[in-house]
Image (cartoon, rainbow, N blue to C red):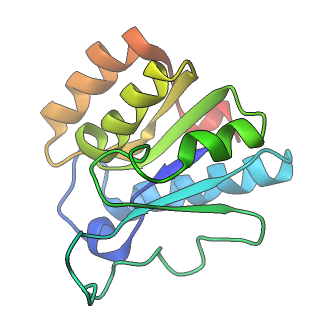
Amino acid sequence: MILIDLMPRIVALPLAPHSGEEVLGRCRRLADAFRAADRPVLLVRVERPNVSVQPPGSGFTEGLARPGDVPVVKRTVGAFHGTGLDERLRALGVDTLVFAGLVTTMGVESTARTASDHGYEVEFVADALSGFEAEEHDLSVKRIFPRFGAVRDTGDYT
């Protein structure tokens, strides 16, 4: 499971069709289910380049990370470039990535496209994603993501 950008400052944004808090709650349930099944949980967050002091809310939301989770700090929209993510996933023996988090058309979609390019199977948890606008989220979930992999809901994993 790869959870993208569940940081206080991003969770607090006006998002649609699901609020950041709704997505965060579903992502917590998903992460717990994956941990219980002894499947890896990777937590991705962004740090802006050339900024020495990160603004408040740049860490993971409180209580999200658990021992054994794999943190990934990205400096670009997607989580693969310059992070060692591919090497970490290969070392864990992962071949399928389940995506959830924020924001659908930014960090999630960018990372998923690169994952597909690297040969991973990809899945998306539609109700554990949200966008800046419902229309852009819906376009990705209904038209783009099915071309890359399965689109499911939280209940399919929990």
Residue 111 place in picture, x, y as percent: 39, 38
Vertical relation: 113 (above or below) 99: above
Residue 7 location, quadrant: bottom left
On the rendered structure, is 118 left or right of 104? Answer: right
> At 28% across and 74% down in the image, what residue appears?
9
**Numbered-mark total:** 0
Q: Answer with left or right where residue 154 lies relative to residue 75.
A: right
Quadrant holding the C terminus: top right
Front one among 25 and 99: 99
Which quadrant holds the N terminus?
Answer: top right
Which corner quadrant of the image does residue 50 belong to?
Answer: bottom left
* Residue at the image point whose x is 32% and y is 66% from the top: 11
In the image as oriented, which residue stretches furthest toward the top? 147
Q: Where is residue 155 in the image (x, y as percent from the top left)?
A: 63, 36
Q: In this view, does 38 lie above or below 121?
A: below
Q: Residue at x 77, y 42 (%)?
A: 92
Residue 131 sits above or below residue 147 on the image: below
Residue 124 in percent (x, y) is at 48, 30
* Side (left or right) of 48 relative to 145: left
Counting from the top left corner in percent of width and height, residue 113 is at 37, 26
Measuring 44% from the left and 43% from the top, which residue is drawn there?
Answer: 80
Q: Is 153 or 94 nearer to us in this picture?
A: 94
**Taking 16 as reference, is 35 left or right?**
right
